[in-house]
Image (tube, rainbow, N blue to C red):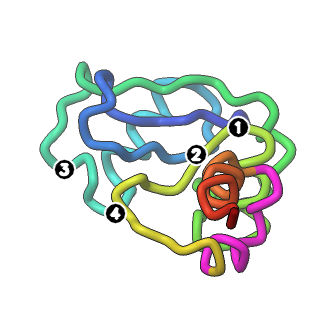
Amino acid sequence: MKAYSVSDRNGDCGYSYIVFAETRAKAIRYALDHCDGCFDYYEWTEMRALRKPTLDKCYNGRFEMDWCNMDDRVAMVKDANFECSGEVDVTVDECKLCSAHEWYGRYERLTSYNVRW
């Protein structure tokens, strides 16, 4: 099984899922059918699936990586440069609780803004 980052073609929805499938086409089909309803109003031609070979090793029988699973999150941030939504305001302390914060650019930006003079 191969890892694919599946999202809408233009990045309009702001979501991307890591899906495991044998082919790009099967990854898109899985996302259209199973990814939290985020792609309910998208057509096949509006989707894209980009290979993420650094995440192939994460396949363990599940067809999708889970951002809420901290082991998955670390792999997604560290190996595929994922970030949490910029629409979610978090404090430095909240960001520090995330298991992936040491590989995460947002944490570095938050801590650099909070330097006390």
Mark 1 or mark 3, which has the lower sequence index? Answer: 3
Residue 23: x percent and y percent? 58, 26
Mark 1 or mark 4, which has the lower sequence index? Answer: 4
Mark 2 or mark 4, which has the lower sequence index? Answer: 2
Question: In the rendered structure, which segment of residues is drawn in magenta?
Answer: 94-103
Q: Amino acid at mark 3?
A: Asp
Residue 67: x percent and y percent? 58, 64
Residue drawn at 43 percent across, 55 percent down: 85
Q: Real-space Cα distance between discs 3 and 4?
A: 9 Å
Q: Secondary structure at mark 3?
A: loop
> Which numbered mark, 1 or 4, is in the foreground of this view?
1
Q: Nearer the viewer, residue 88 or 6?
A: 88
Q: Which residue is mark 3?
A: 40
Q: Real-space Cα distance between discs 1 and 3?
A: 25 Å
Main SS category, magenta section: helix
| Disc ID at residue 18 | 2
| Disc ID at residue 80 | 1
Q: Real-space Cα distance between discs 2 and 4?
A: 13 Å
Q: Real-space Cα distance between discs 3 and 2?
A: 17 Å
Residue 76 visible: no
Answer left or right for 64 relative to 40. Answer: right
Q: Nearer the viewer, residue 48 or 99?
A: 99
Would you call the spot at circle 1 few (<14 residues within 10 Å), some (14-19), or many (20 or more)? some
Q: Amino acid at mark 2?
A: Ile
Q: Are marks 2 and 1 in contact (CB under 8 Å)?
A: yes
